[in-house]
């Protein structure tokens, strides 16, 4: 019926950590292993399928972060890995939609930048995470607010390339 605050906090924390892993990997590895997931392919509209900012390095770092923090949070390596995969698929879906809209990689689109990449893993893994619909909504709101409020700070600390 909602209100499992520990599960909500764990889910929101996992969202932040999994989505932060590609940024950390980029900062640590530079251009190393930054091969685009879409292999530079273009869609029928002539625009990139996903764009150059969606890389194998980012995908693998998100999955690895999911495994590590899944174990740390007590939800398991398998669920954590799945969380990383689904979160990055949601992120890729966002990029696909933004490319169709003519937006450049890393362009800001509030809501669209947070909701698919948070809703997809939370919904698909809701049973393993012990979440119901209200818990998922709370976790998405927490993740969204964190992104909106903390990203400008991370930008000022030179940990993000843009303030969003």
Image (cartoon, helix red, strand yellow):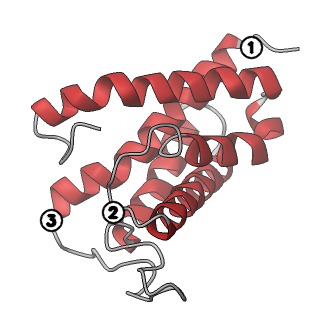
User: In the shown orientation, is residue 25 left or right of residue 8?
Assistant: left
Q: Earlier in the sequence, mark 1 or mark 3?
A: 1
For numbered disc 2, what is the local secondary structure?
Answer: loop
Work out whether residue 41 or residue 16 is closer to the camera in this orientation and state it: 41
For numbered disc 1, what is the local secondary structure?
Answer: loop
Cα gap from disc 1 to disc 3, whole angstroms: 39 Å
Q: Quadrant of residue 31?
A: bottom left
Q: Residue at x 32, y 73 (%)?
A: 52
Cα gap from disc 3 to disc 2, whole angstroms: 17 Å
Q: Which residue is mark 1?
A: 4
Q: Which residue is mark 3?
A: 30
Work out whether residue 5 or residue 46 is closer to the camera in this orientation and state it: 46
Q: Are marks 2 and 1 in contact (CB under 8 Å)?
A: no
The vertical placement of 118 against 23, above or below, is: above
Measured as percent of width and height from the top left, residue 132 is found at: 83, 26
Q: Earlier in the sequence, mark 3 or mark 2?
A: 3
Q: Earlier in the sequence, mark 2 or mark 1?
A: 1
Q: Quadrant of residue 59?
A: bottom left
The vertical placement of 3 against 80, above or below, is: above
User: In the shown orientation, is residue 123 left or right of residue 20?
Assistant: right
User: In the shown orientation, is residue 16 left or right of residue 25?
Assistant: right
Cα gap from disc 2 to disc 1, whole angstroms: 36 Å
Q: Which residue is mark 2?
A: 105
The vertical placement of 4 against 98, above or below, is: above
């Amino acid at each position: 019926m909602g209100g499992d605050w520990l599960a909500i906090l764990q889910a929101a924390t996992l969202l932040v950590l999994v989505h932060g892993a590609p940024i950390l990997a980029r900062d640590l590895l530079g251009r190393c292993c930054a091969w685009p997931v879409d292999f530079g392919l273009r869609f029928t509209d002539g625009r990139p399928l996903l764009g150059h900012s969606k890389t194998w390095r980012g995908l693998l770092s998100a999955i690895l972060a999911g495994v590590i923090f899944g174990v740390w949070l007590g939800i398991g390596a398998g669920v954590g890995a799945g969380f990383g995969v689904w979160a990055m698929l949601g992120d890729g879906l966002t990029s696909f939609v933004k490319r169709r809209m003519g937006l450049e990689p890393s362009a800001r689109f509030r809501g669209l930048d947070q909701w698919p990449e948070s809703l997809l893993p939370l919904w698909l893994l809701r049973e393993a995470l012990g979440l119901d619909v209200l818990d998922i909504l709370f976790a998405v709101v927490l993740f969204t607010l964190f992104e909106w409020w903390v990203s400008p700070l991370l930008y000022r600390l030179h940990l993000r390339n843009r303030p969003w």
